[in-house]
Image: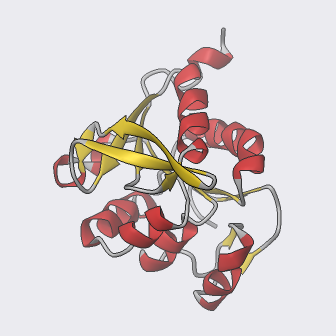
Amino acid sequence: MEKQQALQGKKVAALMTEGFEQVEMTDPRKALEEAGATVHIIAPKGGSIKGWDETDWGDTFDVDLPLAGADPSQYDALLLPGGVMNPDKLRMEPKAIQFIKHFFEQQKPVAAICHAPTMLIEADVVDGRKLTSYPSIQTDLKNAGANWVDQEVVVDGNLVTSRKPDDIPAFNREVIQLINEGVKQTI
């Protein structure tokens, strides 16, 4: 029961748009909610967005808040699911990048999996950080100054990263632990 209440009262923003890798949102959201957190889906537009389920379109999910109406200061942590389309679209949204930057400026926990770290490149927050991602974007991350490693999960200050859906159990464990610890000072 104690584990279930570890994140009681915590609010997590899940920033995504059309084409997010479905399991990279649904599994972490379930783990966060089971730990007591509230998770809000935030997208550039209201209504609903469609996930990507490995090789085809997946389910449709209601957006809790459109990005224009979301205040990052109201959230304790940020979840960035991957997929190929999702981060590629979001990194072209200035409001999405500003939203992400807030969490780094305030040193709040950020969890990014798979292709999501491309948004961190756009937000200019990877230089000097140790992280992982889907292998195909490692060169982009290295060129942006990141210390890319091939590990199932990496924690660097307020940032948790993982490579792919197979890493979700380790990703969830570290995300919950980091959010439970709260704001972390970077070294």
Quadrant hosting residue 170: top right
Q: Residue at x 64, y 67 (%)?
A: 187
Question: x and y percent of residue 24 in the render?
Answer: 59, 47
The answer to whether residue 32 is left or right of residue 187 is left
Across the whole image, how many numbered discs are drawn on residues? Answer: 0
Percent of width and height locating residue 182: 53, 41
Q: Quadrant of the N terminus?
A: top right
Q: Is residue 69 visible?
A: yes
> Is 67 in front, or is 22?
22
Give how far across and how far down residue 151 sits, in percent: 82, 62
Above-or-below relation of 113 to 122: above
Q: Residue furthest right?
A: 151
At x 57%, y 16%, the residue is 5
Reply above or below: 142 against 7: below
**Residue 34 location in percent, x, y?**
58, 20
The extreme top residue here reads 1
Please identify the residue farthest to the left as the structure is shown. 69
Q: Who's the residue at 52% across and 21% down the image?
A: 36
Q: Identify whether 102 is placed above or below 169.
A: below
Identify the image's colour scheme: rainbow, by chain, secondary structure or one colour. secondary structure
**Rendered position, 25 above or below 135:** above
Q: Is residue 110 visible?
A: no
> Considering depth in this image, is 146 or 44 the residue closer to the camera?
44
Most extreme residue toward the bottom is 143
